[in-house]
Amino acid sequence: MKPLFRITLFAAAAVLLAIPVPARAQKQATLQLKRVVIDPGHGGKDAGCVSRDGKTYEKTIALDIAKRLNRKISSAYQDVEVIMTRADDRFVELENRAVIANKANANLFISIHVNSVEKGTTASGYSIHVLGQSQKKGNDLYSKNLELVKRENSVIMLEDNYEAKYQGFNPNDPQSSIIFSLMQNAHLNASLDFAEDVADAMSRGPVKNSRGVSQDPFWVLWRTAMPAVLIEVGFMSNPDDLAILRSPDGRDAIATNIFNAFWAFKTRYDRTEAPANQPVAQPEPQPAPVAQPVVESKPVVESKPVVAPKPEAPQALYGVQVLVSSKKLSPSDPFFKGFTPVVVPVGNVNKYIVCLDTSLENVRKQLPKVKAVFKDSFVVKVEDGVTKPIR
């Protein structure tokens, strides 16, 4: 190990060891989970794991699941900002993924990956990882997960001038990884809590085998200043797992499970009582399966609901959103003051949109009249059952 790296990490360890880890009972009631960073692993020149037939890339699967998770959280929680470390097929340096989260002052970091082994096809299942060294008796984390840790950290070596940037850290040197066992993560308890939430939610399928929660020395988890987990959603090298990962329905089910874990964690984080009805993310309608998997060397095209608010008008529509509510209101309800809304269901809530038109210009002309009654209303685009604000 390079001396500079050793000195830097020991100095950091001394500081982190001095940071008291707050007990759950000491958490302030005013805390709220307002910002989450979703990190699709790999990207661009870094394909990550590749299927044996060369047709499916980890970077593509991770991005698709991350986008689905983004949509589910954004639809259910209007007050939560979701930030993606990458939203397309681009290379993002490992260090910058943590920098993005830290600069945003995020409350939670979720990194999504796919596992693989070089030999054999029997290894399968999902696993969840947080920073640190396993405390389970007889569980030697370095013999168990060393190859996984080395592979995920090895993206460093694709970066320019990585030896200087990472102060001599060598992903292939076990000593460089073992030094992480000296680190104390101030957010370890919260990270473990969320990891257990993910493990519980993922147990519902579609990937059947659980490989549990582990504490491992991943660089990206060490550099994030908030609760952070890394999820390996399945094995690219296992035929059963791969079939699920190639299926839009399978990827959507995985994203739904992670969303349900987010809901459970946010409820505790905000110190609020769980709502009577959990905001369950609804499965997204998927396109018909193709006979032969498409070569996924390009970003996955998002699968969106095929049912538009007006089935007879498949083109994009525009309107003014006046209400989001879990209650189903009649279009003739007095609340709407004579306007006739179209209802767009999203998860367990309904969005009410008035003045629908194919012309954005016409809708903008109607906006002042609507705002006179509904001051918080705004213009949205409605396409394939998905609404997006128009600035």
Image: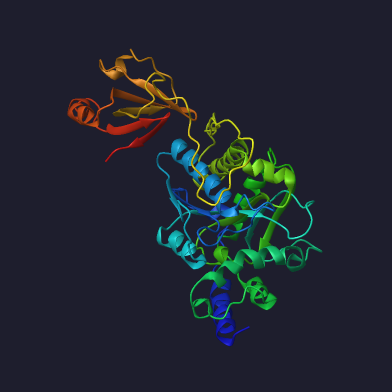
Q: Position of residue 112 (x, y in %)?
A: 58, 52
Q: Is residue 225 visible?
A: yes
In this rendering, is residue 286 above or below 73? above
45 or 165, nearer to the observer = 45
11 or 371, nearer to the observer = 371
In the rendered view, how is the structure colored?
rainbow
Residue at point 72%, 48% (across, down)? 125
In this rendering, is residue 196 above or below 328? below
Q: Quadrant of residue 283?
A: top right
139 or 155, nearer to the observer = 155
Q: Position of residue 194 (x, y in %)?
A: 60, 50
Residue at point 68%, 42% (across, down)? 243
Q: Residue furthest right?
A: 138
In this rendering, is residue 221 above or below 338? below
Q: Quadrant of the N terminus?
A: bottom right
Q: Residue furthest top?
A: 332
Q: Position of residue 67 (x, y in %)?
A: 49, 45
Q: Quadrant of residue 366?
A: top left
Residue at point 56%, 72% (across, down)? 157
Q: Is residue 132 visible?
A: no
Q: Position of residue 165 (x, y in %)?
A: 49, 77
Q: Quadrant of the C terminus?
A: top left
